[in-house]
Amino acid sequence: MARTIPQIFFTLATERGERTALRRKREGTYRSISWFEMARQVRLYGQGVLNCGIEPGDGVAIMSPNCPQWAYVDLATMACGARTAPVYHTEDVATLRYILHDSASRILFLYSPELGVELIDHLATLPQLRQVVMLDGEVAHPLFVTLDEFLRSAENGSAELFAERLTAGRGDDIATLIYTSGTTGTPKGVLLSHANFLSNIDASIEAFAIGEEDECLSFLPLSHVFERMAGYYLMLIQGAVISYAESIDTVPANMAEVKPTIVVSVPRLYEKMYARILDQVLSGSWLRKQIFFGALHACKRYVQLELSGEQPGRLLSLGVKLARQVVFSKIHERLGGRLRFFVSGGAPLAAEIAEFFLAAGVPIYEGYGLSETSPVIAVNTPTAQRLGTVGRPISGTEVRIAADGEIMVRGPGVFRGYWNKAEETAEVLGDDGWLATGDIGVLDHDGYLMITDRKKDLIVTAGGKNIAPQFLENLFKGDKYLANAMVYGDGKPYLTALLVPNFDNLEAYAKYKKISYLNHCDMVNHARILDLIRRRIDRLQEALPSYQRIKRFTLISRDFSSAEGEVTPTLKVKRKVVFDHFRRELEDMYTLSAQGATDRGFCVIDNE
């Protein structure tokens, strides 16, 4: 019986032959890569890796956007008994150097020639690095080779040694080091074995019917464990075709081209889709709005009855069928027309958004997990879904809530520890196998898990009140005029927030109200704009107790940026970094408030 991911892959490749495994856009057209061709490439890459003297347990780093070559390198490295160390392709040279050094990687597969040139100045600090293979372009340095040069050399490599290494693989071998992209602290290498991943895959197969008729659009970074397991290994093993998006910006266009049946994403995609749909409806005629919201009300009622276990009446069922065919059909068309479901993870999904898409006939199954759990801990499924929760624990995984509310997890997906960090491992992983997740949550009476916040993110006000900032931030982001938010107030007398406008909607509002402005800097400081946001914030908070409401906000002229290091690759806000960047603006909301100042805007000139 197969014991490693590459062993399973090659067994399946023999069975599936000329069936399509991957699709990638080239010269304006999506082109197919067969299982036979993919297996040939993985063998060739494996022989090239062995030519570099890679031994079992050695490290191989990958820094590239999603593409077939990413999978070839990954599978080939693991087949040789080595471990991969992926690096987000948007990271800078400092992060790359850190991960290369910490993971002791001997080969780097790199996509960006510009970053390769920068790396040359750091090679003296990386004595273990033997070769850099450029997946695109070239860099003039003895340590660097082009992909063509690497593959030509690989053709003379030992097929016999590759076969021996592949056969010798065991399930408890380390498959990869996943470097955490956490919102605080230095990245840590999470040790995950083949058995860790395969236990998660088996549980996912049990929860979702995925097969050879399915197609998945891949655009979340493969360096992230969520896409790695759910959008790559799971799809590959189940025979679903993996199509690579050209970039995160082209996802809507690629969805229309690829017509996927499954999409795995973080909530930001669904938030943007939801905001765009509502904006288009609200800008339409009175009749169109009445029809849309009437249909939505009926479909929401239908969904609520289904989720509560009740049988919707015949008249309501017929109305919902008609509404989905007539009113919501355009949503399905824009998603390609074949979409069966979305999967959401990486950050909390607002229940309102999940309910909207479910009502429209496009379910989003929200789950929860960590890099340290391979990653899924719990997930909503077609047969067990409860909005506002992240579902029930997956098969084989135990969840309990500690006395302080922290979620504890035990199961076959739990990692082996942090690479070369025994103390940090001991802080979160007990001898009894229970992992402290760092998240706060509750289990309801039916076993559904609800996440309330990160333990480290909880705000304790000067009055001793514990506040979960993510709840408020998701509340604000649900407003059509707001795109992002960070709530602040630890040790302070009240809460404040940095708010990022949805500039598309705000510009339309300004045009309608004949509000003149020069640029985004001018807009966020305009009294009428600030008044609009204040009124909407007050409305959103009116049902909340006083201590849980923000009293002041600053409207900023740009979103939190990955280029500035303010968000993770899955778009979670790095609170410490944002605080460092906006320290004065955050503190001024308290000092200036004492002088009678109210809400205000802030222009980030360098990013205009």
Image: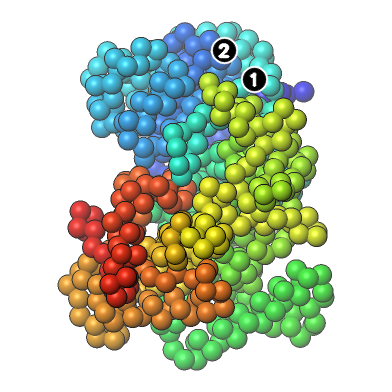
| Quarter of the C terminus within the rendering | bottom left
Residue 568 located left or right of residue 596: right
Determine whether 418 is above or below 327 in the image: above
Q: Secondary structure at mark 1?
A: loop
The amino acid at mark 2 is Pro
The amino acid at mark 1 is Asp
| Quarter of the N terminus within the rendering | top right
Residue in the foreground of this view, choosing between 341 and 91: 91
Within 10 Å of the Cα at label 1, are there few (<14), some (14-19), or many (20+) other Cα atoms? many
From the top left corner, tell me how far across and down residue 501 is, in percent: 35, 68
- Picture quadrant of residue 465: bottom right
Q: Residue at x 50, y 86 (%)?
A: 289
Q: Residue at x 47, y 15 (%)?
A: 49
Residue 281 visible from this viewpoint: no
From the top left corner, tell me how far across and down residue 571 is, in percent: 44, 51
Q: Which residue is mark 1?
A: 173
Q: Residue at x 39, y 73 (%)?
A: 481
Q: Residue at x 37, y 32 (%)?
A: 95
Q: Secondary structure at mark 2?
A: loop
From the top left corner, tell me how far across and down residue 55 is, in percent: 53, 10
Q: Which residue is mark 2?
A: 56
Residue 270 located left or right of residue 205: left
Residue 493 visible from this viewpoint: yes
- Tell me if label 1 and label 2 are in contact, CB under 8 Å: yes
Comes first in the chain, label 1 or label 2: 2
Within 10 Å of the Cα at label 2, are there few (<14), some (14-19), or many (20+) other Cα atoms? some
Could you tell me how far apart the alpha carbons at marks 1 and 2 are, in whole angstroms?
Answer: 9 Å
Residue in the foreground of this view, choosing between 112 and 598: 598
Residue in the foreground of this view, choosing between 60 and 502: 502
- Picture quadrant of residue 163: top right
From the top left corner, tell me how far across and down residue 300 is, in percent: 66, 76
